[in-house]
Amino acid sequence: MSQADLTDQSPAFQLKGSMLAITVLELASNDIERLDEQLAAKVEQAPDFFNNTPLVLALDKLPEAAREIDIAALVSLCRKHRLRTLALRASEPSHLEAAAVLDLPVLPPSGARERQVDLSSKTPAKPAEPVYRPTRVVTTPIRGGQQVYAQGGDLIVLAPVSPGAELLADGNIHVYGPLRGRALAGIKGDTSARIFCQQLTAEMVSIAGQYKVAEDLRRDPLWAEAVQISLSGDVLNITRL
Amino acid sequence: MAKIIVVTSGKGGVGKTTTSAAIGTGLALRGHKTVIVDFDVGLRNLDLIMGCERRVVYDFVNVINGDATLTQALIKDKRLENLYVLAASQTRDKDALTQEGVGKVIDELGKNFEYVICDSPAGIEKGAHLAMYFADEAIVVTNPEVSSVRDSDRMLGLLASKSRRAENGEEPIREHLLLTRYNPERVTKGEMLGVEDVEEILSIRLLGVIPESQAVLKASNQGIPVILDDQSDAGQAYSDAVDRLLGKEVAHRFLDVKKPGFLQRLFGGRE
Ligand SMILES: Nc1ncnc2c1ncn2[C@@H]1O[C@H](COP(=O)(O)OP(=O)(O)OP(=O)(O)O)[C@@H](O)[C@H]1O
Ligand SMILES: [Mg+2]
């Protein structure tokens, strides 16, 4: 190690608390053969799920009479079905002993509620259908210092937009009063978004990140007119409505 | 039920305290029991303009802290039966006002008065926020210049979103525009914004236009609310504004440059 490394006092790590969503395999029986069969059936049903999935093996819900179980065999059975055991959840002394031998961490028995994992669908979940988002309509003046964001859709303003106010939309922006503040359409990158306004006196207009500020806008012959603004390539076009 | 009216602006020195004193006095003159509350902790001057500075024993902060009752702290006007002032403290710092404390005092005043006029400090920080938070109506005092109009606009945004009414989803605060220190000559010369310009930008109803007037300074030096000087242009303009506040239709005056006639020049005209 070099001299510089020894004197470097900057932290080499950080401890962070975190809540992980993790699958728990909660055993109801100590019959390893039956478990093997049933796991095989599950694998067939949802092959994507069994993909070196991290797992907590829970032994704390085993019936009193079925507490005796070969944990080493259980861990290798899971491994065979491509489930990787991270830890045991147990409190029985014999289980704790076995965990120590296998060098597996032990979690305390759970009191919290857990959700049943649904493996019924064979294909991986389809991407969600686009949800219809109603257009956001604002009828009162938007004042300096205020910000209105239409997430996932269009924004319609039926009142004046003051200097220092900011309109944001993932889609289009329509302003049916004087537009004196800023209007940013397509802020998630939709280059087909447009801005429509009755009176272009804006401090700034932007579509998908391409913008013009008042200094440029003022030079446009359509300043203070009713216009629409659209993007072609990286050029903002201002045309009369 | 009492009406809580805040006189606010954002920008400082535009005429809030002058207006609070005039409007409060005007309401009392018309028979309404009215109290004017100074929210400008640390900089009290409502009591000076009202001419009661020598009779301040307890103030708003004393009442909030429980050092005095409201009855002890309310200062009765010497001229008008129906008029009271709750002074601000000059010595305490602004943190003395809490939302809970202010709410209690306003509620209690509401039980005993028809109108509670809240004279807001400048700015948009805590003091101004507390002055407007409990309001039913707001008089937004604006001078005809760009910076004042901008600040009023900002304040209107806060009135619409950060008040008790807004937070409880009730009817919004009724907003009135009061244009003060209006100088028609300077508007004509293009040195100041005109009434229409300001109305256009702020798009709220116009309660009145108070001309720039010597009478204001004279009145405040004497501790007399300018509305009591009924010979003065500013006093008359404030009177009209009070009538409009009470729902009367009154034509606006003092908007145009008046070429004084011969007699007026001789005797000093009124209008
Ligand atoms: N119409 C008017 N004509 C001439 N002078 C005026 C007029 N209105 C107010 N003034 C003067 O402007 C100054 C500020 O007025 P005032 O104290 O009422 O403002 P304010 O908004 O309460 O100020 P602050 O923000 O400091 O509380 C005072 O000197 C006052 O005399
Ligand atoms: Mg003041």
Image: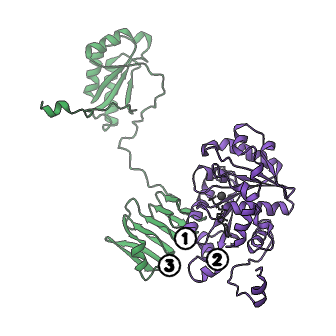
Q: Which residue is mark 1?
A: B146
**Residue type pointed to by label 2:** Asn
Instruction: Using the image, tell me which numbered label, if any, was put on residue A168.
Output: none
Residue found at the far bottom of this picture: B262
The disc numbered 2 marks a residue on which chain? B
In front: B82, or B198? B82
Q: Which residue is mark 3?
A: A226
**In the shown orientation, is residue A143 left or right of residue A59?**
right
Drawing shade for chain A: green
Q: Which circle's residue, 2 or 1, is located before the other in the chain?
A: 1
- Asked whether the residues under the numbered discs 2 and 1 touch, taking CB atoms below 8 Å apart as contact, a structural biologist would say no
Residue B77 falls left or right of residue A166: right
* Residue name at image x 38 percent, y 31 percent: A17
| Nearest to the observer: residue B224 or residue A119 | B224
- The purple one among the chains is B
Picture layout, residue B66 above or below residue B131: above
Left or right of residue B260, residue A160 in this image: left
Amino acid type assigned to the residue bearing label 1 in the image: Val
